[in-house]
Image: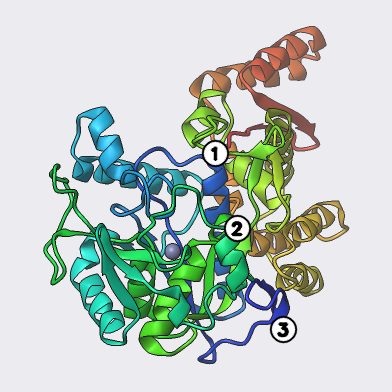
């Protein structure tokens, strides 16, 4: 099946052709581990998880690499401000190392809750300092760097292709300059590959280098890790649309300057998840974490379902009502499949339509409509289940597990069910209804079938 993906590099949907037949090198820019990720950030990882699962469903062997930024990401995103980890450390009284350790654990927990498959390689920036220093030497030898007071900078005017991803012309680069720009830089778009530690303050995280004690620039780790794990050029690079204007152009420039090759062939970007019309963001205080969702009795899987109801390139406006509707919708699916026979034969026709939708730049809303279509169809229930489970290999809604779980009842339900069975035998309908109400209050659904009563307990 031909797969088309929207490539930000060329601003159009393109047929996906991997470098090596049957294999895909996939790189996703990972989180900066200084705080709880918000659900907007996590939404992106759901999307890339579905991309990976889809490629695997089509027979590709995918190697997925993700960086963990635990040093060098400054509060401004550019090269000004304080290191986010050092700032969190100062505020909490814990070391930057402890902060990184703790929030990496939180992140792994969160993605696990969302049924996101962990990348094959998860690499912390601080684990590759030697390689990053080596990479800087290559850039330096090729004449792309210059040194100023606070660090070693990449001269973007030396790389004619700079800014192509963001569609920035040299003139835009000047106009886009930040007011608080470092005046020593040769061009406003130049960025740090190595920052020096401040003289008056000892950082938790700093290293020796041929240029002085300091730490790597934020963009460097991605160029270095992707090359280490996936080679000079790999297939797909993913990230949030906020990376289009700064992080990705800079990453791409470093890689291209060092190797003379395009870093990745396909650049995929997800749109933001919004709240009350604005970007969900930490700085604006308008964000929720997965813990917030759980506190309000919503399941992480309901959030995953909500994200997939939206196409990844259009902004999703998050509301509690939409999450509530997604939760009810997912429960309905589980309730439906709880009664199906064991999985038998998947329907090739419906699956093919489902895959077609996914192959069209990951049209998950359309793909999901086929799931409902299977439920409504005349297929035998075992065939329905087999088809739905195949789809779920891509969607990752964990339906097999949720279905199994729905069959396990709480202990107090067993006596109530027995009593109700007896009441029905005695045609004591008032008692039977009273017991049903009690069971419903426990969250249990009862169905009276020709084979007797059947009870399920749907939990996400
Ligand atoms: Zn990156």
- Density class for disc 3 (Cα within 10 Å; few <14, some 14-19, many ≥20) is few
Q: Position of residue 76 (x, y in %)?
A: 43, 47
The secondary structure type at the circle numbered 3 is: loop
Real-space Cα separation, disc 1 to disc 3, in angstroms:
36 Å
Question: Mark 1 or mark 3: which comes first in sequence?
Answer: 3
Q: CA distance from mark 2 to mark 1?
A: 14 Å
Q: Quadrant of the N terminus?
A: bottom right
In the current view of this chain or complex, which residue is farthest to the front? 183
- Compared across the picture, whether 127 is left or right of 347 comes to left
> Which of labels 1 and 3 is toward the front?
1
Label 2 crowd bin: few (<14), some (14–19), many (20+), radius 10 Å: some
Quick one: quadrant of the C terminus?
top right
Q: How is the image coloured?
A: rainbow
Secondary element at tag 1: loop
Q: Which mark is residue 241?
A: 2
Q: Is residue 108 above or below residue 172?
A: above
Name the spot of residue 45 as percent of width and height, x first: 52, 55
Q: Nearer the viewer, residue 435 or 90?
A: 90
Picture residue at 56% right of the left edge, 23% below the top: 296
User: Do the residues under discs 2 and 1 have CB atoms within 8 angstroms?
Assistant: no
Residue 28 image offset from top left, x and y in percent: 47, 65
For disc 1, the marked residue is 281
Q: Earlier in the sequence, mark 2 or mark 1?
A: 2
Q: Residue at x 36, y 41 (%)?
A: 106
Residue 120 in view: no
219 or 181: nearer the viewer: 181
Q: Is residue 277 left or right of residue 186?
A: right
Image quarter where ligand 1 lies: bottom left
* Location of mark 3 (residue): 2
Q: Nearer the viewer, residue 3 or 267?
A: 267
Q: Residue at x 31, y 76 (%)?
A: 145
């Amino acid at each position: 099946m031909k797969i088309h993906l929207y490539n930000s590099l060329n601003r159009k949907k393109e047929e996906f052709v991997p470098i090596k037949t049957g294999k895909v090198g996939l790189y996703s820019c990972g989180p900066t581990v200084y705080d709880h990720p918000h659900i907007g950030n996590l939404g992106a990882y759901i999307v890339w998880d579905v991309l990976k699962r889809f490629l695997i469903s089509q027979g590709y062997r995918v190697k997925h690499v993700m960086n963990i930024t635990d040093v060098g990401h400054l509060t401004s995103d550019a090269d000004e401000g304080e290191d986010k980890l050092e700032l969190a450390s100062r505020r909490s009284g814990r070391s930057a190392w402890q902060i990184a350790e703790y929030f990496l654990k939180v992140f792994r927990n969160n993605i696990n809750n969302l049924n996101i498959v962990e990348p094959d390689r998860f690499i912390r920036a601080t684990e590759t300092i030697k390689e990053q220093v080596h990479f800087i030497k290559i850039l330096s030898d090729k004449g792309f760097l210059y040194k100023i007071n606070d660090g070693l900078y990449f001269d973007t005017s030396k790389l004619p292709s700079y800014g192509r991803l963001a569609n920035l012309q040299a003139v835009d680069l000047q106009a886009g300059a930040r007011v608080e720009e470092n005046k020593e830089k040769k061009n406003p778009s130049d960025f740090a590959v190595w920052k020096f530690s401040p003289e008056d303050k000892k950082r938790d995280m700093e290293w020796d280098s041929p240029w002085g004690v300091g730490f790597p620039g934020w963009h460097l780790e991605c160029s270095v890790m992707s090359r280490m794990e996936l080679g000079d050029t790999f297939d797909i690079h993913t990230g949030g649309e906020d990376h289009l204007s700064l992080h990705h152009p800079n990453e791409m420039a470093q890689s291209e300057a060092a190797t003379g090759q395009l870093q990745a062939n396909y650049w995929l970007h997800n749109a933001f998840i919004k709240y009350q019309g604005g970007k969900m963001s930490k700085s604006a205080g308008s964000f929720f974490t997965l813990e917030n969702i759980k506190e309000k009795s919503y399941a992480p899987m309901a959030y995953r379902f909500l994200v997939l109801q939206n196409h990844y390139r259009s902004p999703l406006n998050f509301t509690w009502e939409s999450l509530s509707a997604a939760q009810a919708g997912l429960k309905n699916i589980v309730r439906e499949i709880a009664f199906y026979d064991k999985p038998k034969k998947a329907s090739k026709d419906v699956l093919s339509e489902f895959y077609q939708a996914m192959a069209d730049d990951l049209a998950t809303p359309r793909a999901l409509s086929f799931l409902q279509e299977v439920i409504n169809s005349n297929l035998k229930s075992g065939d329905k289940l087999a088809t739905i489970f195949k789809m779920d290999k891509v969607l990752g809604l964990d339906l097999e597990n949720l279905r199994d779980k729905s069959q396990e009842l709480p202990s107090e339900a067993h006596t109530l069910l027995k009593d109700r069975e007896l009441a029905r035998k005695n045609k004591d309908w008032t008692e039977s209804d009273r017991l049903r109400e009690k069971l419903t209050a426990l969250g249990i659904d009862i169905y009276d079938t020709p084979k007797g009563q059947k009870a399920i307990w749907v939990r996400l």
